[in-house]
Image (cartoon, helix red, strand yellow):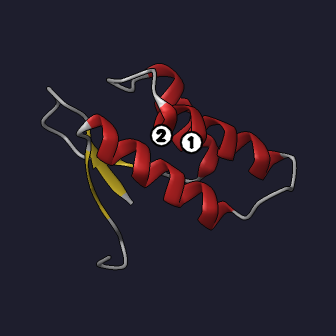
C-alpha cells in the first residue's frame, strides 16, 4: 500500500503494521477521532495476536479516508 500525506509530494510505501502504526503515531495529520483511535487499537491487537493484519489494514484505510490521506493499494484495490 502507498499513501501520500498532505503537503508531501512523495509517496510513502507502507511496509507492514509496525510501519503503519509509526506513521499514525508520528506523521498523521489528524490525531483524534474514532477512525484514528480504532486504527491504533487495531495495530496493538495485531501485536497481541487478537486480530489479523488484514483487519488492521482496513482500519488504517478508514483512518486515511477520515484524515484525507490519499492511498493506493498494491493489488489495485
Give the numbered dot on residue 39.
1
Q: Secondary structure at mark 2?
A: helix
Residue in the picture at 61% in, 66% down: 54
Residues at circles 2 and 1 in contact by the CB criterion of under 8 Å: yes
Residue 1 shown left or right of residue 72 in the figure = right
Q: Residue furthest front?
A: 34
Residue 25, given in percent of the width and then of the height, sits at 53, 24
Distance, label 2 to label 1, CA atoms, is 6 Å
Residue in the picture at 68% in, 38% down: 41
**How many numbered marks are there?**
2
Q: Secondary structure at mark 1?
A: helix
Residue 61 shown left or right of residue 76 in the figure = right
Q: Nearer the viewer, residue 34 or 64?
A: 34
Residue in the picture at 61% in, 49% down: 17
Q: Quadrant of the N terminus?
A: bottom left
Q: Nearer the viewer, residue 13 or 27?
A: 27
Residue in the picture at 77% in, 60% down: 51
Residue 61, given in percent of the width and then of the height, sits at 41, 53
Please tell me whether residue 57 is drawn above or below residue 45 in the rendered image: below
Give the numbered dot on residue 35.
2
Residue 37, given in percent of the width and then of the height, sits at 57, 32
Q: Quadrant of the C terminus?
A: bottom left
Figure quadrant of residue 56 = bottom right
Residue 61 shown left or right of residue 37 in the figure = left
Q: Nearer the viewer, residue 11 or 50?
A: 50
Crowding at dot 2, Cα within 10 Å, few <14 / some 14-19 / many 20+, comes out as: many
Q: Nearer the viewer, residue 63 or 24?
A: 63
Q: Nearer the viewer, mark 2 or mark 1?
A: 2
Amino acid at each position: 500500500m502507498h499513501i501520500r500525506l498532505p503537503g508531501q509530494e512523495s509517496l510513502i510505501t507502507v511496509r507492514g503494521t509496525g510501519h503503519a502504526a509509526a506513521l499514525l503515531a508520528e506523521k498523521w495529520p489528524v490525531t483524534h477521532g474514532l477512525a484514528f483511535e480504532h486504527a491504533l487499537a487495531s495495530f496493538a491487537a495485531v501485536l497481541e495476536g487478537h486480530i489479523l493484519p488484514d483487519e488492521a489494514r482496513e482500519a488504517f484505510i478508514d483512518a486515511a479516508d477520515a484524515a484525507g490521506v490519499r492511498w493506493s493499494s498494491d493489488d489495485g484495490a
